[in-house]
Amino acid sequence: MKKWICLLLIAIAATSALYAAYPDEYPIFLRLLGFSKDDIRHLSDGGLIKRSIRNALPGESGIVAAQVSNIPSYYFRDYFRYVENFSSLTRFGDTGQFSNPPDLQDLKPLVFSKTELQDFLTCRTGPCQLGLRPEEIQTIPAEADLESDAGREIASNSYRELLLKRVLEYRDRGADPQAAQLLKMQLSRFAELPAYFPVAQEYLLRYPKEIKPMVDNLFYWSRESIGKKPVLTLHHVFSQRVGEDFILLNYVVYSNYYFDSAIDVIHLLNYADRNRPATLIVFEQRTLARATAGGPGRNSIGRSLEDRWTSRLKTVSKTLETRYRSREYLGFPYRLLPRDQR
């Protein structure tokens, strides 16, 4: 009898140690991102924690934020299967998803202002603010009368064709050598990726050499107001499942103003400290400003981005919790596991 009691006590102790160690992984993960013990306690109490990024490159800005949301992790992931929902994080003025394969028709809703078209045409004859390659500049119309509808349409179509070509080239060959170098430098600053998600890191670095069927890929364009000009960007988003967790990476393939490279990483971790469905949402964003943006301008843009990312993470989390509790949208998500029905 004593022998069985001893074995039972050992089993209970071992089980307790196992379950105690699992939640402790989250503090380790968060410490990699620069959060303190006090931050982690605040997170456990339902607060949002945030920090500016560490080990920033010259001209790089960004933010790391975390929050626990009372929804299943796959519910959050399903939300971002629709490109329109990225607007809740970035507040796009315009956005559109590319079809497979991308087509010029995907960019037809993109209407350029006269100022945007003037900057585009100026690249042909003078200093170019749009980060275009020499061979791209050669395709810009030598003359286009922006005072006429026909002239604006000629310039607009040329701009759209250039953007489409950027997406097609990236899908076929990946980032060009200069962009690939910046991508590698930025990814090396995400301390948690090699430790927890090395497969996702390698997938983006090697894309499209190793396209995996279990990875969801999404391409879209967006335009939003940052600084004095509306910023037009082309994005590659992919999500990957890791056990019951998910990781989403959003890479800016091209930006016309201000940025040379930008990456968003969203971790959706099944939170073990709750007796109901909960997700630890960890958001990290890094933006590398273009040198021509100027020193003070680069800093102010970085601060503006940090503020908007924080407020929008709160908004997204609150929105999804409301939808999950109220079943406000009956067709979303695709399904709920029986254990998560409320």
Image (tube, rainbow, N blue to C red):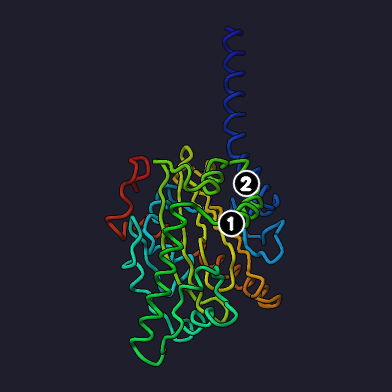
Q: Position of residue 163 (x, y in %)?
A: 44, 67
In this view of the protein, which residue sits in the foreground, 333 or 54? 54
Q: Where is residue 218 in the image (x, y as percent from the top left)?
A: 40, 55
Which residue in the protein does label 2 denote?
Answer: 192
Quadrant position of residue 273: top right
Residue pushed farthest left?
A: 330
Specify which label sits upstream in the sequence, 2 or 1: 2
Residue pushed farthest bottom?
A: 147
SS assignment at label 2: helix
Asked if the residues shown at circle 2 and circle 1 are in contact, with their CB atoms under 8 angstroms apart, the answer is: yes
Residue at image coords 45%, 49%: 239
Q: What is the three-letter code of the residue carrying label 2? A: Glu
In this view of the protein, which residue sits in the foreground, 46 or 106? 106
Q: What is the three-letter code of the residue carrying label 1? A: Glu
314 above or below 17?
below
In this view of the protein, which residue sits in the foreground, 82 or 333? 82
Quadrant position of residue 100: bottom left
Disc sitting over residue 284 in the figure: 1
